[in-house]
Structure formats: C-alpha cells, structure tokens
Image: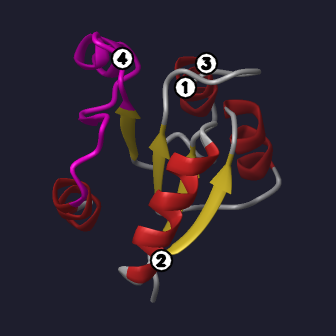
Amino acid sequence: MEKKIMIVEDDLSISEALKELLSYEGFNVLQAFNGQEALDRLQSGYRPDLILLDLMMPILDGIGFRNEQLKSHLFSQIPVIILSADGNIKSKAEQVKVSNFIKKPVDIDHLINVVNSI
C-alpha cells in the first residue's frame, strides 16, 4: 500500500517540486498551503502516514499547526518531518516534539531516506 504524505508548504514551487519527487518515488501526496488548511484536512478525516511541515507560513504557521495536532488524540501520533530554512530549526523542532527535521534547501536523497525510514 502506498504511503500517504501531506506536504504543508506555502511556497508553491517548493510544494510542487516535493510533490513531483515524492509521487515519482511512489508516495500518495496531498498538498496543504498553510497550517490551517492542513488542520482542516485532518479534521475532515484525511489521515496521512507522514506530514512534511514548513515552519514559516501565513494564516497558521508550522508551530501553531503542530501545537494543534498534538492536542488531538485522532491525529497527534502522525509523524512529522519539519522542512525549514529557519536558523533555529533544531530548537523549534524540539519545542514541538519533532525529532526529524531537514534544513532547506532540501537534500533530495536525504529527504527520501528519512521519509522511507518512518
């Protein structure tokens, strides 16, 4: 069965590149362009196997999304990989209980390895 991945990324070019790459690798990919859209998808019943989460987004940022995700017993256990250019990515990931993070620009081989390991 295909692993379902939700990309939460406001930059259309990055989101599309990730979607194309992951689809090519055999994953079923859904895009959300801010944290609120991603939260709405989860609340409507979509259950990805993994979430790729940007931190800096409009409407609801990655930290806000992750805090809301953690409050829900329905989707708090969905694994998250943070993808960000934020210089404090490690401390921010720790703050929201995420152990996997990748600094942008993303190393594609590393991303695929991390996604496959989860």
Q: Residue at x 57, y 49 (%)?
A: 13
Sequence-first disc among 3 and 4 = 3
Q: Which residues are magenta?
A: 84-108
| Mark 4 element type | loop
Q: Residue at x 35, y 14 (%)?
A: 92
> Residue 43 at what x, y percent from top left?
78, 47
> Residue 39 at what x, y percent from top left?
72, 39
Query: Label 3 to label 2, Cα distance in Å?
Result: 27 Å
Q: Is residue 84 left or right of residue 8?
A: left
Q: Which residue is mark 2?
A: 23
Sequence-first disc among 2 and 1 = 2
Q: Which residue is mark 4?
A: 86
Q: CB of mark 3 within 8 Å of CB of mark 1? A: yes
The residue at the far front in this view is 13
Q: Residues within 10 Å of mark 4 (few under 14, many from 20)?
A: few
Quadrant that contains the N terminus? bottom left
> Residue 52 at what x, y percent from top left?
45, 47
Amino acid residing under circle 2: Ser
